[in-house]
Image (spheres, coloured by chain):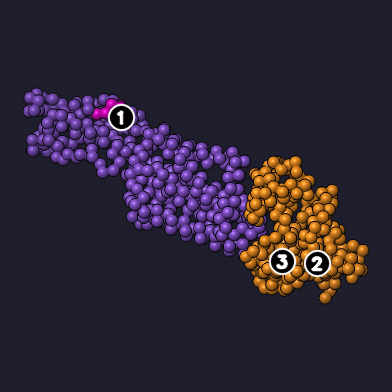
Chain colours: A purple, B orange
Amino acid sequence: MRPGRAFLVTKRIFWSLRHDPRTIALMCFAPILAMCIFGIAFSGNIENVKVIVINRDQGAYVPASNMTIRISDLIIDNMDEKKLNIHHMTDENEAIGAVKDGKYSSIIIFPEDFSRSVVNASQGGGEQAVLRIRSDQSQVNVATEIVQTVTNAMLKTLGDRGMKTPVAMDVSDPIYGKGARFIDMFVPGIMGFVVFLLTTLLTLISFVGERTRGTLTRLFANGLTEGEIVTGYAIAFGMVGMVQVGILLTVAILLFDIMVVGNPLIAFLIASLLAVVSVSLGILLSSLAQRESQAIQFFPIIILPVFLLAGIFWPREAMPLWLRPLSYLIPVTYAVDALRSVLIRGWGLADIWVQLLALVGFAAIFLTGAVYMLKFMRGR
Amino acid sequence: MKAIEVNGLSKSYGPIIAVSGLDLHVDEGEIFGLLGPNGCGKTTAIKMLLGLVRPDSGSAKVLGRKAGSKGSLENVGYMPQETALYEELTVKENLKLFAGINGLSGNEYRKREDEVLDLVNLGERRDSILSTLSGGQRHRVSLAVSMVHAPRLLFLDEPTVGVDPPLRANFWRTFRKMRDRGLTIIMTTHYMDEAVNCDLIAMMREGRIIAQGSPSEVMSRSKAGNLEDAFLKLSREEVKV
């Protein structure tokens, strides 16, 4: 292989890009758009949830305060007003009707003996106080947020009044990701996804184009080898992958103030490795398509497994056990793991060598596969 | 040295015989025409000589080197049937790319760029994006690209398909000019009338050569007034046999 000739293939791709502003726009704006859409959609907190409170609590004498109070009122006062928009009712059937009509998300019911039970329980006797929450569980995350808000208010109220709770939890000192939000976890995922998706699809389309236009045959007829072509493509798209990560990081930092604990240069390295894997996969898949319209049919096959199994949007721990091994067959899984570890945990090269090794392995297998596929196609 | 030496070259695609027992010997400095109707195996034959298709049997040498071996394409140019260039690049960028692939240095290239663009009369369009050129102009760029590295042997696959008569005449003037400078041209065509411009021809039918020689020899042998009649007569005789 002559490196100079491989570099000419790289140069040609950049010449083509220079004359093709639409593709440049796709490469630059698609990451920005993806980051903005996902960032805005996922960085927002659940707020202003309309809930109904039915408070039947008759109050109880609280020794610590030396007076009779309704603890339920204190809990309601401590509920985060930004999160819950509270409306009071007395009739449970009317409240259920309002939730069924979709006007409210949940009903929080304090029973008559609520304060009494709380006081007794905190003194080590009596029955446990029961607070009923009846939610519209069709919106699971909203329902979970309501429970969380009520629990926080309850713990704060009891703590303020010097009442004992059975268990206290302190989560204020995490090992990694102190102050991390969902978007901080999500940005590395979207980086891996965008680089993989755009590189694979662009290579697939442009390689099918090389074949249908006859330029691939012409390159071979001019003595270019399969290895030189694949290397040239890998260098070009590896560089494009780094630019995309640069754009993604800039947008994520400027617009969403994401957490970057580790060295961003390592993130560039991971992205370019992933881009090389994606280029080779694109070339491999291109051999299965005769024309561009056929190549487009591969898009769902490429997108869906990565979207669902690579741990981009939700942790792999949330997948069924039997499905988890499949995620290890997807290169993006390793790239996202590595990016997350570098950006949020602040890990260095020595800590992510397994993921890097996996990516290098995928790159080696796919590159070799792409070269042999081209040789096979050429010989026919 | 022979530019081309082919002995018993054959290629089949499943039950379809594309080329069968092809024998060709072409001296340097000749225009050699491979004639025949569409699908008779001309392009497959050329692609085997370029190492783009693996033959089932037989042997082929190109400028003394085994076809398809490393370095066998040095000093060889190829103009495919379709334009097969990067439409989004300029004429100059296409030329520069293929000159670079063929190992031309910057200085050598600059000299050759003017030469080949003058030859195809496109000097003023060198900075135009290829997709903005007419079909005929693109065809001329394709010819220029195939010659940019000053090859000794040039394969032209149906170079005049879709080319209007004045441009076709222009092409033939260019081919003769290049032949006179010592270039060997192997071309395929299904236009029998223009094949009289070749020094030597081989007529192909269903993957086999049915006649070979100079155009006048082939015509006199078959007692025909032109190459088209000669081909039809020879084809009928083949069928009878």
Q: Is residue B144 left or right of residue B177?
A: left
Q: Position of residue A36 (x, y in %)?
A: 44, 35
**Front residue of this view, candidates A298 and B204:** B204
Residue drawn 72% across the image and 58% down it: B151
Pointer 2 indicates a residue of which chain? B
Q: Give the residue number, with chain letter if any, for mark 3.
A: B63
Q: Is residue B222 left or right of residue A222?
A: right
Residue drawn 83% across the image and 56% down it: B176
Q: Are marks 1 and 3 on the same chain?
A: no
Nearer the camera: disc 1 or disc 2: 2
Name the N-terminal-most of marks 3 and 2: 3
Amino acid at the residue labelled 1 = Lys
Binning the other alpha carbons within 10 Å of mark 2 as few (below 14), some (14 to 19) or many (20 upward) gives many
Q: Which mark is residue A83?
A: 1
Q: Position of residue A13 (x, y in %)?
A: 58, 47
Please tell me whether residue A49 belongs to the stretch shown in magenta: no
Amino acid at the residue labelled 3 = Leu
Residue B122 visible within the image: yes
Q: Give the residue number, with chain letter if any, for mark 2.
A: B202
Residue drawn 19% across the image and 40% down it: A169
Binning the other alpha carbons within 10 Å of mark 3 as few (below 14), some (14 to 19) or many (20 upward) gives many
A213 vs A98: above or below: below
Nearer the camera: disc 1 or disc 3: 3
What is the span of residues highlighted in magenta in the rendered image?
Answer: A79-85
Disc 1 and disc 2: Cα gap in Å?
87 Å
In the rendered image, the quadrant that contains the N terminus of chain A is bottom right
Tell me the SS state at disc 2: strand
Query: What secondary structure characterizes most of the magenta part?
Result: loop
Q: Position of residue B4 (x, y in %)?
A: 74, 67
**Front residue of this view, candidates B31 and B13:** B31
